[in-house]
Image (tube, rainbow, N blue to C red):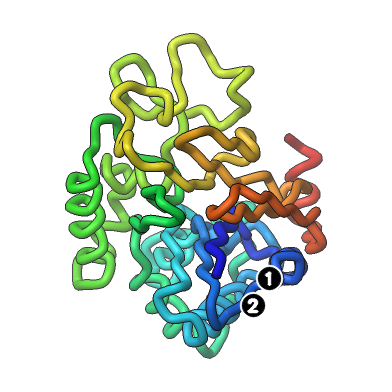
Amino acid sequence: MATWAIGDVHGCFRTLQALLGQMKLDVRRDRLWMVGDLVNRGPRSLKVLRWARAIEDEMGDRFQVVLGNHDLHLVARHLGVAAARPRDTLKKALKAKDAPELVDWLRRRPFVHFERVAGRDYVLVHAGLRPGWSPEDVLEAAGRLERRLRGSEVKRLLRRRNRKSLAAFTRMRMLDGKGRPADYSGPLTDAPSGLKPWFRVVPRGCPEHTIVCGHWAALGLLLEEDLIALDSGCVWGGRLTAVRLDDARVLQEKVIDRNPETNRALRSL
């Protein structure tokens, strides 16, 4: 039995399938974690969502997906709370006959997942944790958001995506000297003076846990004693990454899916 974690897929279904083939995933015994952002920017978001629902039927709670900002954007667009963005590739997912069921499935995903693997305590989250948060703080904040996402307050929640807890779980990268999120998404080497990545601000959230996350493509694959950052920029021409938590084995698959809109956006960066 192995526990694998996979980085941001962003609709790159063919690349995901190739990576799963490398992993030789045993759906009867293994565990599989996804860091969120299953959808958008890549060309096959609908296929990724249908795959995720199907594999959950096979694996049950051995399959864990946490919500990313692009997953929430799909929910918001489906509910009429958000408008299309220039780089969105969500039309097929939004127009599919099973779109209501797929969106409902996303709304029932958690923002965090805690689990002990091979003697180590892990937290799975899309972006990050606020400084000083204890596991109890994290679970309380996530629980409040999840109840609103699944209930009648969903539209109000999605309109207020600058909420501190929601922003931490789904969008946080850098913090300024006062612990406020900064609008910077580039590589660490080019970061403006005075900013720190959220995972190097002391006291870090859940310091006794290893955090498994994604979201930050320019950061790339980063493996530290208490951090596994898995967004290696697959949709931007990079690779999709999987790490086996049991022994830190890394597998990568160079992007196979090609999307003209994404490629044009990449050339313009």
Q: Nearer the viewer, residue 175 or 203?
A: 203
Relative horizontal placement of residue 28, taking residue 140 as reference (left or right): right
Q: Which mark is residue 250?
A: none
The three-letter code of the residue at mark 2 reads: Lys
Toward the front, the furthest residue is 119
* Any part of residue 134 in sight: yes
Please name the residue shown 43% across and 81% down the image.
60
Query: Rounded to the nearest whole Å, what is the CA distance between mark 2 and mark 1?
Result: 5 Å
Q: Quadrant of the C terminus?
A: top right
* Any part of residue 92 in sight: no
Helix, strand or loop at disc 2? helix
Q: Nearer the viewer, residue 51 or 88?
A: 51
| Cβ atoms at labels 2 and 1 below 8 Å apart | yes
Q: What is the x, y in percent for residue 257?
A: 79, 63
Toward the top, the furthest residue is 193
Disc 1 marks which residue?
44
Q: What is the x, y in percent for residue 31?
A: 51, 69
Please name the residue shown 21% across and 72% down the image.
151
User: Quarter of the image holding residue 2?
Assistant: bottom right
Q: What is the x, y in percent for residue 114?
A: 34, 56
User: Quick check: 178 above or below 153?
Assistant: above
Q: Residues within 10 Å of mark 2 (few under 14, many from 20)?
A: some
Give the number of marks. 2
Please name the residue shown 45% across and 73% down the image.
62
Please name the residue shown 50% across and 55% down the image.
35
User: Quarter of the image holding residue 82?
Assistant: bottom left
User: Quick check: 117 above or below 182?
Assistant: below
Helix, strand or loop at disc 1? loop
Disc 2 marks which residue?
47
